[in-house]
Image (spheres, helix red, strand yellow):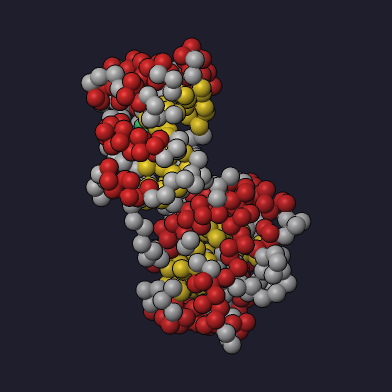
């Protein structure tokens, strides 16, 4: 398991006597990268120095809103100099507004926040943001100054769902600290539901807010694993899924140099997915491949299509999985022989096999292939995408043109006739009428139906 602590103040005096041991304990707990944010000029310099000394440590440079009354133009210029000093400066932060403590005047906080956002823009760096009780001003300054392709994270989030929605629409990530483990933090845990895992980061905010059972003690990055189960429970994913997804998110946001190799076999929850091709006979308007090479933190853009032997090797031991799934980062039936050989192997081992497909396999192979699945495929999920031929052609843009839709319906009927459990899926973006039409078709064909949310992949 690889984890990233995206917010830990390792430059604070709390670690002056045992930083080496703190880093070692974190490495043993799986933490592979640390982002240390500066909270003032001296702290930013310390963060850069730490990043120079320790390979897994990266720095953010920033000035906390508490300092706003004491910062002038020279301070901002000094911040620029520090940001220029090292290629391990990966963000501008911690910056923002804090009206809760009120250590600096709101007007000065807003001025400082604007100045720091301009520095982030100049350096094309993401931002690490702090907001406490300043939601309206905070959002209005972000809207005023964040460039369209803005990047950043609001750390230790504790505001409300409305602000989460606004931040997500601005392209921001969100992270929660150790207080999500506190018994009375139901409101905070409820907020997590509003953040898709693809926009979530992990942080400890060390030395503050140690999670249960360390509450009240000095926090440290090794405790970050305590947050995994809370997130996993909320999203219906595993702790490993949360670790992988958040590490990928942090790596993309801060460019932390963590190697992410394309996966041929990849676990999500208790299923093992197989990525056997990136080719497809459709060009669906909503296809995730157009904007991302990743699903739930797995890199899925293949360098080359794997052979059957390579697929089997990548699968490893399969007895712990509820099912093996040929999945759709590409159309699996383009590689029918690989499916048949691997599926037979899984069945021999007593496993269950599911095929996720666009249903065009018989057109691809030029014959009815459903008979070939008998006994080796337990379940088929077919993405119907539209309730009629014209809608399908418009949304999925199949290379087979108008022939595709009828062939898909025949494929569904064929699988059902071979005793395979079939489920038709469609996306909520179709609207009420479109969804009702797809559901009706599933009923007429006597197969299952599942509505999928547009923004959830994997
Ligand atoms: S069928 Fe699946 S993989 Fe192919 S374009 Fe559509 S969404 Fe993408």
Q: Residue at x 49, y 19 (%)?
A: 447
Q: Judge from the rendering whether residue 181 lies leftward or rightward of residue 35; answer left or right.
A: right
Q: Judge from the rendering whether residue 132 lies leftward or rightward of residue 430; answer left or right.
A: right
Quarter of the image holding residue 368? top left
Could you say which is closer to the camera, residue 275 or residue 385? 275
Picture quadrant of ligand 1 = top left
Q: Judge from the rendering whether residue 302 lies leftward or rightward of residue 63; answer left or right.
A: left
Residue 141 horizontal/vertical position (percent): 55, 57
Residue at the extreme right of the image, as rendered: 184
Q: Residue at x 76, y 56 (%)?
A: 184
Quarter of the image holding residue 204? bottom right
Residue 270 horizontal/vertical position (percent): 51, 44
Q: Residue at x 57, y 84 (%)?
A: 18
Residue 441 horizontal/vertical position (percent): 47, 15
Q: Is residue 418 visible?
A: yes
Residue 385 horizontal/vertical position (percent): 42, 25
Q: Judge from the rendering whether residue 266 lies leftward or rightward of residue 224; answer left or right.
A: left
Residue at the extreme top of the image, as rendered: 444
Give the total of numbered labels. 0
Could you say which is closer to the camera, residue 454 or residue 30? 30
Quarter of the image holding residue 398? top left
Does residue 359 lie above or below 235 as drawn?
A: above
Could you say which is closer to the camera, residue 334 or residue 78? 334
Q: Is residue 135 visible?
A: no
Q: Residue at x 73, y 55 (%)?
A: 185
């Amino acid at each position: 398991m690889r984890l990233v602590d995206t917010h830990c103040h390792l430059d604070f005096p709390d670690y002056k006597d045992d930083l080496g041991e703190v880093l070692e304990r974190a490495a043993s707990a799986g933490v592979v990268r640390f982002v240390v944010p500066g909270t003032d000029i001296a702290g930013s310099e310390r963060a850069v120095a730490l990043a120079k000394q320790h390979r897994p440590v990266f720095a953010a440079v920033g000035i906390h809103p508490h300092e706003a009354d004491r910062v002038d133009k020279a301070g901002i210029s000094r911040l620029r100099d520090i940001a220029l000093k090292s290629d391990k400066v990966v963000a501008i932060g911690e910056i923002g507004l804090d009206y809760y403590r009120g250590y600096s005047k709101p007007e000065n906080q807003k001025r400082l926040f604007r100045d720091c956002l301009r520095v982030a823009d100049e350096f094309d760096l993401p931002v690490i943001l702090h907001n406490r009780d300043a939601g309206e001003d905070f959002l209005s300054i972000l809207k005023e100054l964040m460039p369209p392709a803005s990047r950043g994270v609001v750390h230790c989030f504790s505001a409300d769902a409305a602000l989460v929605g606004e931040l997500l629409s601005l392209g921001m990530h969100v992270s929660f600290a150790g207080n999500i483990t506190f018994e009375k933090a139901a409101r905070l845990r409820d907020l997590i539901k509003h953040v898709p895992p693809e926009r979530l980061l992990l942080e400890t905010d060390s030395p503050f807010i140690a999670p249960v059972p360390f509450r009240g003690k000095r926090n440290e990055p090794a405790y970050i694993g305590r947050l995994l189960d809370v997130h996993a429970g909320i999203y219906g994913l595993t702790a490993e899924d949360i670790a992988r997804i958040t590490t990928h998110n942090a790596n993309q946001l801060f460019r932390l140099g963590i190697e992410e190799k394309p996966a041929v076999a990849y676990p999500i929850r208790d299923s093992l997915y197989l990525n056997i091709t990136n080719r497809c006979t459709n060009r669906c308007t909503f296809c995730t491949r157009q904007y991302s090479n990743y699903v739930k933190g797995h890199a899925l853009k293949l360098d080359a299509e794997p052979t059957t032997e390579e697929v089997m090797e990548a699968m490893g031991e399969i007895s712990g999985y509820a099912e093996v799934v040929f999945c759709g980062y590409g159309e699996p039936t383009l590689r029918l022989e690989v499916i048949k050989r691997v599926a037979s192997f899984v069945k021999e081992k007593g496993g269950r096999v599911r095929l996720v497909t666009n249903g065009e396999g018989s057109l691809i192979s030029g014959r009815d292939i459903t008979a070939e699945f008998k006994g080796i495929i337990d379940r088929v999920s077919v993405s119907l995408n539209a309730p009629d031929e014209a809608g399908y052609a418009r949304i999925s843009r199949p290379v087979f043109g108008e022939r595709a839709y009828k062939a898909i319906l025949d494929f569904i009927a064929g699988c059902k006739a071979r005793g395979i459990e079939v489920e038709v899926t469609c996306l909520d973006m179709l609207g009420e009428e479109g969804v009702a039409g797809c559901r009706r078709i599933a009923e007429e064909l006597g197969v299952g139906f599942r509505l999928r949310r547009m923004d959830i992949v994997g």
